[in-house]
Amino acid sequence: MSTIEARVSTQSGGKYIRQLCKHWSHKLETQVEGDTGTVTFPNAVATMAADDSGIAIAITGEDREAIERLTGVVAVHIDRFAFREAPLTYEWAWRD
């Protein structure tokens, strides 16, 4: 299993996570509890948790190439909901 993580600065992280999970719930399995959300993609799982200063994102799966593609997908979608402050800064780092 490989995991890539990012920390994104925003004061509206919980709102963006809830919007993103609702948006993807029509096609993917999602779970939301408060300011934490999980999205299950066909070959990876994205977990997001917000606090007062931002969103912690972790994407875990077997295929590193697929995980890297998902970093862009997740970032673009969060930026859509964060349009007033987008583009946000995503600094992705592998944790193995």
Image (spheres, rainbow, N blue to C red):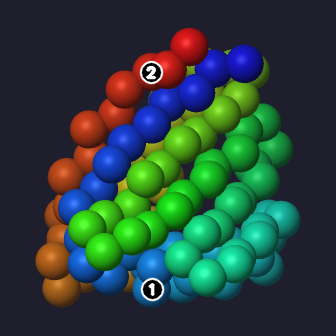
Q: Which mark is residue 15?
A: 1
Q: Which mark is residue 81?
A: none
Q: Amino acid at mark 1?
A: Lys
**SS type, badge 1:** helix
The C terminus sits in image quarter: top right
Q: Can you identify the residue that label 2 sits on?
A: 94
| Rendered image quadrant of residue 30 | bottom right
Residue 88: horizontal and vertical position, in percent?
A: 21, 61
Residue 37: horizontal and vertical position, in percent?
A: 64, 67
User: Which residue sits at x=59%, y=40%?
Assistant: 59
Q: Is residue 12 above or below residue 79?
A: below
Query: Quick one: label 2 or label 1, which is nearer the N terminus?
Result: 1
User: Which residue sits at x=25%, y=68%?
Assistant: 53
The one of 7 and 87 positioned closer to us in this rendering: 7
User: Which residue sits at x=45%, y=37%?
Assistant: 5
Q: Is residue 86 above or below residue 5?
A: below
Residue 48 visible in the current orientation:
yes
Mark 2–mark 1 Cα distance, whole angstroms, equals 26 Å
Q: Residues within 10 Å of mark 1 (few under 14, many from 20)?
A: some
Q: Residues within 10 Å of mark 2 (few under 14, many from 20)?
A: some
